[in-house]
Image (spheres, helix red, strand yellow):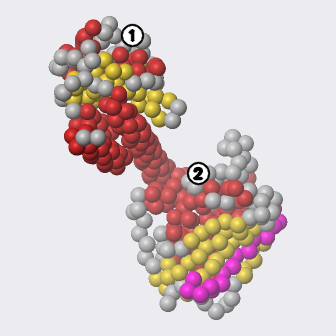
Amino acid sequence: MTSLTKTGQLKALEGRGKLLFRLVEMSVTLNSTLDLEALLQLITSTATELLDCEAASILLYDERNPRLYFAAATGSDPAQLAEIPVPIDNSIAGTIFRTNQPLILNDVEDDPRHYQIVSEHVKIKIHSLLGVPMPIKDRVVGVLEAINKRNGDFDESDSITFSVLAAHAAIAINNARLLRATQQALNKVRETNQIKTNFLSLASHELRTPLGIIIGYATFLQEESKGILSEHANQVLSAATEMRALLDQMNNLTLLQTDEMELRPSKVSVQDVLNFALDEVKYLASRRDLQLVLAFQEDPIFVNVDPEKTILAFVNLINNAVRFSNDGGEITVGAVQQGDQVLAWVQDKGKGIPVDKLRKIFEEFYQIEPPNTRSYGGLGIGLSIAKGLVEAQGGKIWAESEGLGKGATLKVLLPLHK
């Protein structure tokens, strides 16, 4: 073997090593770029560099309107290129897409599948072309094309290099598309949540004035009338008071969602918090003949919380227990110190919670029963409000139940006042 031959082989190996290094470098760059437009431009510029050609283009498959379209091309406006229809049949790119095989054409002008309109748009007279499919697993998502080799013709070595680039490009484009779709979905969710928040705020505000008038007149009628008329007024007053409580819940949920609720933590005994909460629901519990059992010591256990907001959280928890308890049942409210925290709980012996729904019950507007057939009232926001109020103060809240018909215990951890 002559020294000239050895030199040629060494140069060839050196060239392959540089190419492999560039492919690895390119793969890292492509998979770290998640902006779709920037990624498409990066792929075309990398393609022209690797194959030493005049231009490159990317055609992607449109699943909703079965055809290929230009997503990017060297020195061209993507919006104008996208308007060029590229059929799956009777086109060079379509042939590559359908057969899932590379195609080398070193004399494009003589090929009947060549689109002259493409040459006009990219403003390049196409002499030679190398096209390869862009695969992801068992499907092809597009075609990568290189145009006009600068020195010589496209060959099999170029085809192999280009196929590696196309495979990496397909994965990178798919990832960027998924990210964009996820961002669009999140934006829609945010818009929907904003509409819901605005509605809750508007409804709770606009309904307060007429509701206040109803409560005022009902109270007046109850005090001034006797017999059946007084009973009717009492029913109106009871229903209006319940509606006002729902409006208060809607307003509290809106404040939590918009981070506008002010919290003023102070030293307060957990026993006082629970007793105040119990006072709020005693009337409702008595109407169901429910027994309220206290399970905490007399010596005060001090917590560092906002008293008003924490009482509201426990009112919601106890109301939930009342709603899902059987008439004549029992509800236990307790608290105990655990290290530098205080554990409080509300336990009922009522309907219970399916094990797979223990977390979902704290979601906004969630109801275990179907909305059209449920037998229990409420908007399904009481527990989500309680969760928001507790967690906003550095606490934790969760539910425990052995299943339907076996009751439930809602537990809360609050920070101990030091």
Report the magenta residues as a range: 327-341
| Residue 335 visible here | yes
Tag 1: amino acid: Asn
Spatial CA span between label 1 and label 2:
55 Å
Quadrant holding the N terminus:
top left
Q: Is residue 81 left or right of residue 208?
A: left
Q: Is residue 144 above or below residue 18?
A: above
Tag 2: amino acid: Phe
- For residue 114, what is the image quadrant? top left
Q: Measuring from the top left, give residue 307's x and y in whole percent.
A: 51, 77
Q: Which residue is mark 2?
A: 365
Q: Nearer the viewer, mark 1 or mark 2?
A: 1
Q: Secondary structure at mark 1?
A: loop
Q: Is residue 141 left or right of residue 244?
A: left
Q: Nearer the viewer, residue 105 or 132?
A: 105
- For residue 215, what is the image quadrant? bottom right
Q: Residue at x 49, y 74 (%)?
A: 394
Q: Which residue is mark 1?
A: 90
Q: Residue at x 57, y 68 (%)?
A: 313
Q: Residue at x 69, y 88 (%)?
A: 297
N-terminal-most mark, 1 or 2 = 1
Q: Which SS type dominates the magenta stretch?
A: strand
Q: Secondary structure at mark 2?
A: loop
Q: Is residue 275 above or below residue 112?
A: below
Q: Residue at x 74, y 49 (%)?
A: 375
